[in-house]
Amino acid sequence: MPLLSQKDRDFLKGHLAHSMVHPVTLLFFTQNIACQFCKETEQVLKELADLSDKITLEVHNFVTDRDLAIQYGIDKIPATVVMGEVDYGIRFYGIPSGYEFTSLVEDVIDVSQRKANLSAESLEKIAAIQVPIHIQVFVTPTCPYCPSAVRLAHSLALASDKIRADMIEAIEFPQLANKYGVQGVPQTVINEHVRLEGAAPEPLFVAKVLQAAGLMTAQAVDQLLIDLEKAARGS
């Protein structure tokens, strides 16, 4: 039984036809046992790939294709890599369902256009990053605020070859959620020690990444937060 309704399929097919430029490959890592949502995730990806001849789905076994999994840094499943002619570091760990299906679709379009959905100021700031950055955004499918955090993280990965960004479905990976003390979503962890709770505006999200890269102090980030809150109040 299809997961997408005919109405949704028709809309998405038109949206992708209008928006996509270059081919996109979805690398999906799965296995037949001990993976609760692998089958459902593969179905989501297949239905999306069927909507455009510019989307190719490659399905790989996490065990038998271990060398490939290591090459792409895949250490848990279900895992999806969204890539173009190169790997931009965009990862989905867990099923991209609910609100996160929109994140997947828009990521595919961004990769197809080879264009990060970021301001010119943000692009200039992250161009200075010279150390590896690993962003983990914990989400749940029913969280309406989570896609904005995922989209920001993945846009940063698309814009910088120093950044890898993971969407992690917290319910599917409780051991990771417990490790990082995730009590609510979205919660973002950057290079293990810099954290951001909630759906942050782009300037604050970028500032946290710069903090993790050693290009901005925690005090400067705190001051930015104060300034953003004042601006939001109109004071």
Image (cartoon, rainbow, N blue to C red):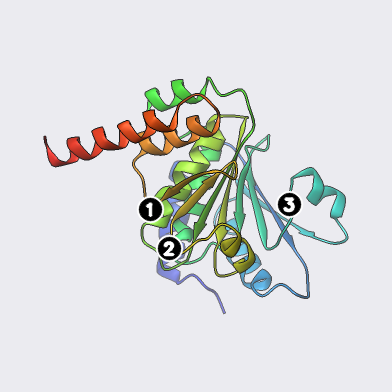
Q: Which residue is mark 1?
A: 198
Most foreground residue, 193 or 144: 193
Of the 4 image quadrants, the one containing the N terminus is: bottom right
> Please, what is the three-letter code of the amino acid marked with disc 1?
Gly
207 above or below 144? above
Q: Quadrant of residue 200?
A: top left
> Please, what is the three-letter code of the amino acid marked with disc 3?
Ile
Q: Which residue is mark 3?
A: 74
Q: Is residue 191 left or right of residue 17?
A: right
Is residue 24 visible in the rendered image? The answer is: no
Q: Which mark is residue 184?
A: 2
How packed mark 2 is, by other alpha carbons closer than 10 Å (few <14, some 14-19, many 20 or more), is some
Most foreground residue, 56 or 198: 198
Most distant residue in the left direction: 235
Dot placed on the residue nearer the N-terminal end, 3 or 1: 3
Number of numbered discs visible in the structure rendering: 3
Tell me what residue is drawn at x 42 percent, y 56 percent. Answer: 146
Q: Is residue 56 left or right of residue 7?
A: right
Q: Which mark is residue 90?
A: none
How packed mark 3 is, by other alpha carbons closer than 10 Å (few <14, some 14-19, many 20 or more), is some
Mark nearest the camera among 2 and 3 is 2
The answer to whether the residue labelled 2 contacts the one labelled 3, judged by CB atoms less than 8 Å apart, is no
Q: CA distance from mark 2 to mark 1?
A: 8 Å
Most distant residue in the bottom direction: 1
